Image (spheres, rainbow, N blue to C red):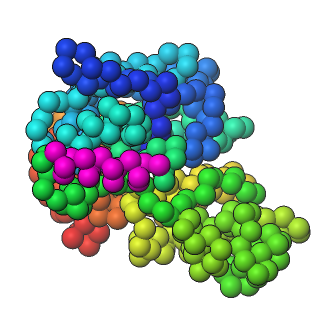
Amino acid sequence: MDMQRKTWTIQDFKAVNENGKLIISGYANTKNKSDRYGDVPTVLTEKRNFVYDLAEFKKNPVMLLNHNNKVESIAGSFSDVWEDDKGLFVKGVFSDSGLAEIKHARQVYSEGHAKALSIAGRFFFEDKENPNNLTLAEIFEISLVAIPADSDALVSAERKCLENLQKRGVVKDCSTVKENLTVENSNKTVPSYQNFALSERDKEWDASEAAKRIRQFTDSVDSPSESYKKAFFYYDAENPDKFGAYKLPYADIVNGKMVAVFRALAAVSGRLNQTQIPQSDKDKIISQVNKYYVKARQQYDDPNIESPFEREMTPQNYKELNIILKDKFDLGRKRREQVIAVVKKALLNDDTFYKELLNERYPNLMEDIKKIKNVLEKIG
């Protein structure tokens, strides 16, 4: 399972100054409630009494900006992180750094304009009867990002704060700071996971013909209706009235119902890398595609079905990698599984962040991976 990122708005958000330090706190995620991805964090009592595995994160609880794994992007650290009956509580202390990006982050969080965190980790859905239940979140890293409950409000707040920084002489050019800030949000949108039933496995996929049926079914003959977007993994929220704004179709109408077409999922997987959308949105789409492949294994009763995003290397490649991790780095079984999950993420879409993370913790590991058969072309 690949390491992924999820962005949540802090609940019960507080920003206070204590002894000259800005401290933010609140719940990064709440249990038994559907989040913005349609996932419901739920304790799977037959396996464990918690949802969030914080062991790895607590070893180095830094507060990064936008998952940028560089020293100059450390905005502070999380002094307290724990799980209770309500959810995942976090308390972060900002650094007094004079770097413009960190000053800006400190300002917008202090004023309450920004309230979002992005969490990198591995997310497990082990409840077969309730596939949307997020039963385990292994958390590796937490970043400050710019996605609030109201995205338009943040864009305005960000612009205003940057202008204030420029007036006060903190930065000379607002555009320079804005270019250096990786804003996870965009005017493009990934619809929530629909959890459609799957079509027959061998159903042919014709995107143009499917679109005609979707238009008729959703009453979108002249322009897209609100329900039209459900048939796509991605759309441009700035132009919702244009059919061309909807990308990566995967649904069709079968027997009067909208269903996900299995062969369409493969088509989406092949096109995603070439689609010009933010990586954070690609991660959300990958998460949804993977969920449909889990459903496909169950619905088609075929344990050999796997998502294209889960097979960046062959099983033999991973056996070789497992040996390297065991013999060269002396890692135990569980830790090897975690590192292999990060390796998958590093290879997927040539992800620089995770490559740097691996090389920081396990020097020269990526060089070792290059030597493994059939992987060289994947990481360049």
In the displayed structure, would residue 350 be above or below residue 135?
A: below
Residue 350 horizontal side relative to residue 209, left or right: left
Please state the extent of the stretch shown in magenta in the rendering: 153-168
Please tell me in which quadrant of the rendered image residue 209 appears.
bottom right
* Picture residue at 48% right of the left edge, 75% below the top: 271
Answer whether residue 218 is visible to the viewer in this image. Answer: yes
Q: Position of residue 376 (x, y in %)?
A: 23, 69
- Is 184 colored magenta in this rendering? no
Q: Quadrant of residue 63?
A: top left
Vertical order, 22 against 129 (above or below): above
For image coordinates 24% across by 43% down, the residue present is: 104
Of all residues shown, which one is farthest toward the front? 167
Q: Quadrant of residue 283?
A: bottom left
Nearer to me, 161 or 183: 161
Write the residue at 29% across / 69% down: 378
Residue 35 relative to residue 161: left or right: right
Q: Residue at x 12, y 56 (%)?
A: 172
Q: Position of residue 145 (x, y in %)?
A: 35, 45
